Amino acid sequence: MLRSLLVENYRLFRKLSLDRIGQVNLIVGTNNCGKSSLLEAIYIHAGMGSPGHIISVLRERGEFTPTRGGVGEYQIGHLFHGHTINSTLSIKLQAILRTGQTATLTMTPSRVTYPRRREPPPATSEENIELSITYRLGDSIEIKDKLRLSPIRYRPGSYVFFSSEQARFLTTRYLGYDELALLWDEITLTPKEDRVVEALQILEPSVRRISFTSRQTSNSGILLKLAGQDEPVPLGSMGDGMRRILALIASLVTVEGGVLLVDEIDTGLYYGVLTDMWRMLLETAARLKVQVFATTHSLDCVRSFQDALANREESDLGLLIRLEREGDDIKAITYTKDELAIAVQQGIEVR
């Protein structure tokens, strides 16, 4: 787990320091202050610079240049502060872990050339740009890799699961049947099934069981058994909130000891269920040792987060992180459980 984080030269962040990080963190701030970018940076760091994590981030943003035949090439420049590639500037993600170790990830761009090419690409082109990736954990472990993002081909219709063994990243889009089925493969016939049912009962108390069919039907391949109902009910007929809760709890219980990142966590959820959602998330994260980072624009979500924290004995379980612009820079302001309670009670705007 992360205790603190330094982000340099990544997207909106020239330099961002998070001196305090909790186990469950709610990130707030105005539009275009870097909330989603912060989730991406943590996701890339959690993967120790895995090329798969970097490519997932680029794909989710749609950062590619279209070429012939409906394909495209990844745009690496948008990862860097100012949207500009400069071989003298590296992306640096440095964390102090709960163990006290320092974990540092650096990504440095360079241009590679090929002898068969008659002319070099223009200086402004991203063609043949390569990322040199280095991950260091303390003084003992060092991982090096290289990633050439152009001219790797990208098809908009193709699919990459925004997930790995170290981290799960839920964006604002809804997970499809195939994505949820992959998660369910890790849950079925284990005690984690009970946690999934308990989470779904936040929205529908009559839920008793959940099942995935061998193929997706015209409505949904995910079925729910409800109390008092002889026939199973498709999840698709239960509303978007049920699918969001399922994606949230399934992602949480399948990343034990890792990181869960959720963009706009309250998407599709009625404000009246948010406190119960946070209670479920706080309890499960503490039990499974998962570190959670979520964003929101909703004051109801912030208040519900504070309500859920008030019932927990741990003083450092939850933290509110507000990102705030100061000119061209962005700084982080943190609120502990007690500080957040005072702010909410006094009507102080923390979003």
Image (cartoon, rainbow, N blue to C red):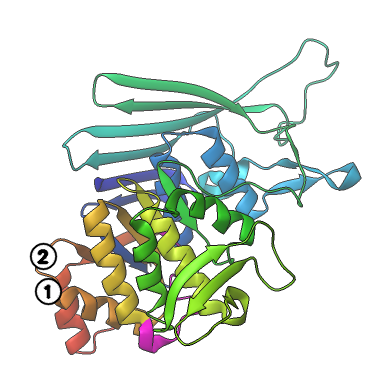
Residue at the far top in the pictured view: 115
Q: Position of residue 194 (x, y in %)?
A: 35, 64
For disc 2, the neighbor class at 10 Å (few under 14, some 14 to 19, many from 20) is few
Secondary element type, mark 2:
loop
Tell me what residue is drawn at x 43 percent, y 70 percent: 265
> In the picture provided, is 306 more to the left or to the right than 180?
left
Mark-to-mark CA distance, 2 and 1 = 8 Å
Q: Position of residue 300 (x, y in %)?
A: 35, 85
Q: Position of residue 79 (x, y in %)?
A: 55, 45
* Amino acid type, mark 1: Asp
Residue at the far front in the pictured view: 230
Tell me what residue is drawn at x 58 percent, y 80 percent: 231
Secondary element type, mark 1:
helix
Q: Position of residue 334 (x, y in %)?
A: 23, 64
Tell me what residue is drawn at x 47 percent, y 60 percent: 36
Q: Which residue position holds label 1?
A: 338
Q: Quadrant of residue 232?
A: bottom right
Q: Which residue position holds label 2?
A: 315
Closer to viewer: mark 2 or mark 1: 2
> In the picture provided, is 327 more to the left or to the right than 281?
right
Q: Quadrant of the N terminus?
A: top left
* Amino acid type, mark 2: Ser
Residue range corresponding to the magenta coloring: 261-273
The answer to whether the residue labelled 2 contacts the one labelled 1, judged by CB atoms less than 8 Å apart, is yes
Query: Along the line of sight, which residue is nearer the eye, 267 or 137?
Result: 267
- Check if residue 114 falls in the magenta segment: no
Q: Main secondary structure of the magenta part?
A: loop
Q: Is residue 271 shown to the viewer in this render?
A: yes
Sooner in the amino-acid sequence: mark 2 or mark 1: 2
Q: Is residue 22 shown to the viewer in this render?
A: no
